[in-house]
Image (cartoon, rainbow, N blue to C red):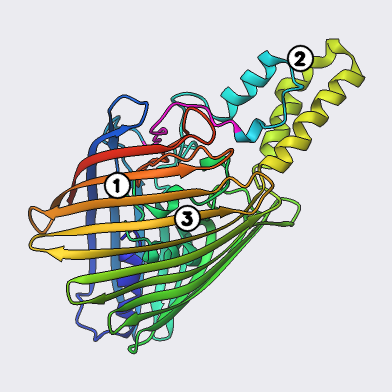
Amino acid sequence: MKTKFIAGVIATCFAAPVMAQSSIQIYGVADAGITKTKGESARIFSGGADGSRIGFKGTEDIGGGYKAIFNLEARVELDTGTQTPTLITDNPGLYLTKGMTALPPALLAGIRNAIQPKGGPAVNPEKALFDRTAMVGLITPVGAVLLGRMYTPGYEVFAAADAFETGTAGTWGGITGGAAGFTALGADIRSQKSVQYRIATPGGLGGSIMYGGKQSGYLGRYNKFQGIAVTYKANGFDVGVGHNRGYDWMDRKSLVTTTVGGSFTTGAFKFFAGWHDQENNNSALLRDYIGAWDTSIAPTLAPLGAPTAAALRNVFVTNITRNSQVDATSYQLGAHYKMGAGRIMASAARQNDHTASNSDATLLALGYDHNLSKRTDVYTVVAKIKNQNDGQYTPGVSGSPGGFTKVPGDDSHTFQVGIRHRF
């Protein structure tokens, strides 16, 4: 799991003091494979089951039950050697520009290309070096205080409930969010410029509280961010309740999510279940969209006259405001079955869109993961997404969103095979 290091760190808060005085570790994941999506040619991907990365983590025992820790983790795209993955497909997402047919065709095409350029970055457009994690903290006898860019409390619960562990074409996150796809987040995965307090008890109860100020959140667009989670990890259970809440630049509620779920292990079986609610009436990206119109498009419309330019701007602002909103509930059921050196994975997930678009989506996935050694495994996954109305969801991987189907409402299916090595 992507949050494994943090969970391990918190466990040391209540462990016997047997660690060395200090330690620094270089670690990482090299994960790549091939995917074949309906209507697309086969492609090599990076970060299928796990996002490929290189990281540095360390701890120093400073006495009295206190330890200083840090974690720096950089994204690495094995297919290109860069840190900015692109979408699995090159099809344009049409939902954000829905209702804008009154705009001149050339202008509308330019807006669509600017929002989702072919071959453009889908994640980490800032090309940040340590965009996955950048954190320093202090473990105390009564919990840990961490500062930096970290996974959010709500997302950690979401990840624990995902039968495909937030990776491959089967990940539950492939259909969460709005009909606008990856541009309308269904969860704040990380939050930068944040402080977090975490605690774990010997009995398995744990919790975390996170707060971020200006430029916090996954995209760094919030005026403030708040998150909280309560978890239980014992007796075969890994379950929790998490809640995240972001506020836009005008301090209005932006993306708000609540997640309940986790897993239960018994014998060769591991069962997963999750429920996720997301609502966003004030997208933190709205200022970016409108600002781009005013600085890049408005000057080119001046020759048309002020009334026409204002009318065209109103068409854009009205529709981009509505189309960037999210109101949906999602749920998933899944299971693992250990079989020799491997495991079979299966899940079914449903996204219930509550907006007027009613763009529901259903995801079915089946996979097999085989351990070649303690560090290396190979996996294969088949997944299908059934879209409704304006939905263009298509399966992705851990490191890259899938993108969009060619036509709204079209179904999508994917076959993937990959290899993962942990070091």
> Is 419 left, or right, of 256 in this rendering?
left
Residue range of the region highlighted in magenta in the rendering? 83-94
Nearer the viewer's eye, disc 1 or disc 2?
Answer: 2
Q: Is disc 2 placed on a helix, strand or loop?
A: helix
Question: Which amino acid does the dot numbered 1 rest on?
Answer: Arg
Where residue 300 is drawn, which disc sits there?
Answer: 2
The disc, 1 or 2, on the residue closer to the chain's N-terminal end is 1
Where is residue 362? Give x, y as percent: 45, 50
Q: Residues within 10 Å of mark 2 (few under 14, many from 20)?
A: few
Residue 90 on the magenta span: yes
Nearer the viewer's eye, disc 1 or disc 3?
Answer: 3
Q: Residues within 10 Å of mark 1 (few under 14, many from 20)?
A: many
> Is 24 left, or right, of 163 in this rendering?
left
Decide: is 289 above or below 243.
Answer: above
Image quadrant in which you'd find residue 102: top right
Q: Residues within 10 Å of mark 3 (few under 14, many from 20)?
A: many
Badge 3 is on which residue?
350
Residue 245 on the magenta span: no
Nearer the viewer's eye, disc 2 or disc 3?
Answer: 3
Badge 1 is on which residue?
53
Q: What residue is shown at x 53% (from left), y 51% (from top)? A: 218
Where is residue 104? Give x, y as percent: 73, 15
Question: Which amino acid does the dot numbered 2 rest on?
Answer: Thr
Decide: is 379 above or below 145.
Answer: above
Tags 1 and 2 touching, CB below 8 Å: no
